[in-house]
Amino acid sequence: MEINEEVITFEELYTKIKENIQDTEELLKIKEAYQFAKEVHKGQKRLTGEDFITHPLRVAEIVNGLNVDSVTIIGALLHEVMNSGEISQADIAEKFGETVATIVDSVTKINKLELVDDSEYSAIYLRKVLVGLATDVRVLFIKLADRLHNMRTNYVIDPKKQKGKANETTAVLIPIAHRLGINSIKSELEDLCLYYTKPDVYNDILEKLNDSRDLLNAALQEMIESITEILQEQGLKFKIKGRVKSVHSIYNKLASGKKWNEIYDILALRVILDKVSDCYMAVGLVHSKYRPIPKRFKDYIAMPKANMYQSLHTTIFGVDGYLFEVQFRTFEMDEFAEKGMASHWSYKEHGTKKVQHIMEQKLEMFRNIIETNEDQDDVSFEADVNSDLLAEMIYVFTPKGDVMELPRGSTPVDFAYRIHSDIGDKTVGAIVNDAIVPLNQELENDDIVKIKTNSNATPNKDWLNFVKTSQAKNKIKSYFSKQERINMTLKGKEILEKELRKRKLAFNEVMKDEAINKICKDLKLNDLDDIYLSIGTLRYTAGFIISLTEASKESLEDAIITRVNSHGNESISYKNDIIVSGMGDILVNIAKCCKPVKDDEIVGFITKGQGITVHRKNCFNISDAKERIIDVSWNPKSEGIYLTDLYIVTEAKKSYISDIIAIFTKRNIYIDELKTKEYDNSIGYEVTLKVKNKEELDKVILDLENLSFIISARRNK
């Protein structure tokens, strides 16, 4: 689909920007950003043959159409300047401030990742990055505008890549546009993606529409004139628009099982009025002349959609036997329907507090998921993203009228934790719409919820069986984790005191301050409570702790050697997947220098203050320390996940980060960290992976070595 856009100039864009932004300093910064981008992109061309600067101009034009703030427009103009490698985030921060620099850096990172295949794992990584960067939602505004302009010129790239971009847009970006309520971008992307994924279907629908285009337009015009006359008679102020529904909208009806001759409501009208009361009056006036279809009237003003869309919908029998879908809304509702939350981002006077409050909650949900799931695996992370961010939402109210956004299926407990964790912890009951309800009752749109609390109350573990939001789940789990720590600490204290009594030793004589300090230093613990906790959780035995306080004052290393010798060659399975000769209650760590994984050849190294550290046998850090080496082996029954490092060197032609990620995702291997370093003739990628064993790691290294652009792929150290 080739869209012929006239080349836009900055002067034309600037004229449009001034309609939304009047602040002189902000306008000067926008001019400065354009000049900066123009200089950076000087001499660069797009595949269409146009000067590259046309792309940032179009992206800025699209976001400006959403009534965004100057920061978003500046970010749009600059969103490609870091790709050359000559402009850094610090350079942008110096000229345009930290906020703009962070936004541009985030967009740059997002644009380096692609959904390179149809696997779920590729989508997980891409969505995770998008959600992570969406702590400033303006990044998403720019990304959506960037993709829209690129999809308009998608025809210039390879046909296989055309379809890939369309699939990625459908899977990842269109749902985000929908959640943000940006219908103007969402609708155009849907049509463009349908064209590139199902061109035959798209062209067939378009051809049928074109065959009847004149008749449809004539019917639209006649209905516009008729409704205009009806409303003018009542002195209402309004604006009316008519259109033939989009190709994608008709495709959805066909995909649901309808045949072409069964689709009647192809024509749509939109009536925009001054006040909400005018909307209800107008729909009544239209119904008095044109018979509505039963059960097709929808009141989204009183009951907004999940993304805060508001309008009255009805379908009527109109002129010439055509069915017309007619929408009635206010001017503010119409702006929000087309531009979504972006239209209120600048928080101008005409912005509604309700929308601002919802946006703040949405960003808080983004942040909460990122912050509370740092150590979570990607599948669990994806589940939380889907349940909290991409699920259908409901909107409920506090008794004071503040609106709260929650995923459908949420309960009063989710509501309580959304207000504050202390409220959630102390919840004892809930009143919904003036009626007492169980805490596991699912809330509905427009419910008014009041939470009853008690200062002595604590969370209930049973709540985990019904709460919906990851925020509530994590707060409840955190509470019981803290309680478990307290219980284990008390248990450890009891075990130590019992062992001392058994040996007929006085607590105050053995556990003196200097002894406690020595134990904490040797075992890298913080205080006496940490010592108790290590005993209560069976990390160390009480006997071992006492042995470190005895008059010999032997070091931790000496204590370990003594215990090894006294136990002979006996092997005990340790819970950390390592079998240590003679040890069952000694701290075992995996060495960070060589990061062994299961089935590597390994040895144990007695490390001061850290118990036994397991190294790969060929690790250079232990080559000269044979006196501290002890025998260790892998527990064949272990099913742990291990961190290890790969260093990958590629050609310097372009960034191959998405291709490398694709290799890992196909093998179901997760990335914990990735760092990039550019050299004159190559690019280095230092990747920390989560793997099960050496066989799994060897296979992924072989996959990487088979790629034409890979110079080398090896483990560090």
Image (spheres, grey):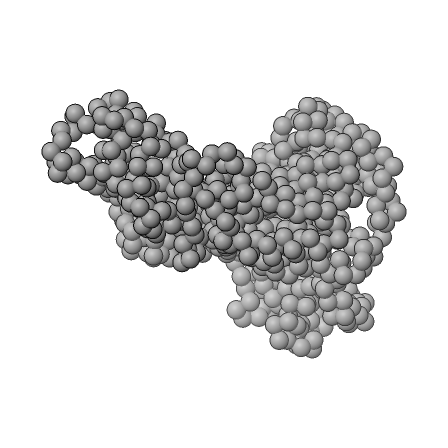
Residue depicted at x 64% and y 67% = 252
Residue depicted at x 57% and y 70% = 293
Q: Relative to residue 159, is residue 79 depicted above or below?
A: above
Residue 245 in the image, given as x and y percentages of width and height: 70, 63
Question: Is 84 positioned to the left or the right of 491 in the image?
Answer: right
Frontmost residue, 109 versus 639: 639
Question: Is 510 positioned to the left or the right of 534 in the image?
Answer: left
Frontmost residue, 404 versus 655: 655
Residue 285 in the image, given as x and y percentages of width and height: 59, 60
Question: Is 497 positioned to the left or the right of 629 in the image?
Answer: left
Q: Relative to residue 100, is residue 650 depicted above or below?
A: below
Question: Is 571 positioned to the left or the right of 624 in the image?
Answer: left
Residue depicted at x 66% and y 45% = 648
Quarter of the view holding residue 61: top right
Residue depicted at x 66% and y 36% = 105
Residue 596 in the image, given as x and y percentages of width and height: 50, 46
Quadrant assignment for the N terminus: bottom right
Quarter of the view holding residue 653: top right
Residue farthest to the top, as pictured: 514
Whether residue 597 is visible here, answered yes or no, is: no
Whether residue 553 is visible here, answered yes or no, is: yes
Quarter of the view holding residue 16: top right
Tag count: 0
Quadrant assignment for the C terminus: top right
Residue 618 in the image, given as x and y percentages of width and height: 54, 43
